[in-house]
Image: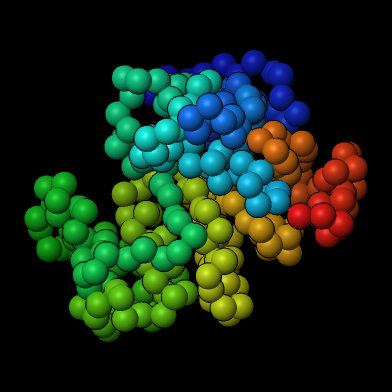
Amino acid sequence: MADYNWNERHLINFENNNALYTNDLHVFYGTKEAINGIDMQFQKNKITALIGPSGCGKSTYLRSLNRMNDTIDTARVTGEIMYEGVDINAKNVNVYEVRRRIGMVFQRPNPFAKSIYENIAFPHRQAGIRKKAELDEIVETSLKQAALWDQVKDELQRSALAISGGQAQRLCIARALSVKPDIILMDEPASALDPISTMQIEETMQELKKDYSIIIVTHNMQQASRISDYTAFFYTGDVIEYDETLKIFTNPTCKSTEDYVSGRFG
């Protein structure tokens, strides 16, 4: 994909270090507008948190970034989603290639009803990889990246449905990593997990940002402040404020941002 010259116009300008950006992005469900023309950039090898009250549009926006809203019959997305100089919202773009490069981890763990090994190997086998040594390497590397290898290396044939919620979520992260994406989208990945599993997911994310750009939706203000480098506050389909996380939580520019992060509403 060709390089893209970024035209300075947004609150945060990452110049040539942006992993992805949207320009005038709108999302409609039928006649209802859920996202009201958002311009945002995301920096490479950083964690960006999207925060805001329920129904504010942050998950809808996140799902747009790898065309997951295409799976909703009533959804319509307009505007640009620029990745490596290509508008991935264009009709002629291969959506499956988009989702390989921009992976997704959902709110609730969704492992396949297969073994731990096959959860990672199966998609690659379907793609034509047959050599066991190659599949073994993919499985091991992915599980190590997701900080799960040491826990499951001796029980790879165990059903993925029989492991703990935290392990299942890290298995889903490993599955997403196995296809070597550039960007990982996470929609409340720890909301269904206990505090210890949540901490392990957060530690994993901190390690992953060395190699990946991560965009996470979270309702947990403490989590956003702990793990993210940048934070965007969403409200009624708009981004109200987008800045370094420390500034958002200690010295926000907008009063509505301050009210939300301090717990006055939301």
Give residue 42's quadrant in the image.
Answer: top right
Residue 226 x, y percent position in the rendering: 71, 62
Residue that extends furthest to the front in the rendered view of this protein: 31
Please state, as top left, top right, bottom left or bottom right, where the N terminus lies in the image: top left
Relative to 198, residue 84 above or below: above
Drawn side of residue 51 relative to residue 168, left or right:
right
Relative to 33, residue 102 above or below: below
Relative to 255, residue 87 above or below: above
Residue in the picture at 43% in, 25% down: 89
Drawn side of residue 266 relative to residue 199, left or right:
right
Give residue 206's quadrant in the image.
Answer: bottom right
Residue that extends furthest to the bottom in the rendered view of this protein: 154
Drawn side of residue 254 relative to residue 188, left or right:
right
Please state, as top left, top right, bottom left or bottom right, where the C terminus lies in the image: bottom right
**Which of these two is toward me, 57 or 106?**
57
Residue 52 x, y percent position in the rendering: 70, 49
Residue in the picture at 89% in, 39% down: 253
Residue 136 x, y percent position in the rendering: 21, 65
Residue 21 visible, this angle: no
Residue in the picture at 87% in, 39% down: 254
Residue in the picture at 51% in, 53% down: 186
**Which of these two is toward me, 201 or 114?**
114
Relative to 78, residue 215 above or below: below
Residue 74 x, y percent position in the rendering: 42, 33
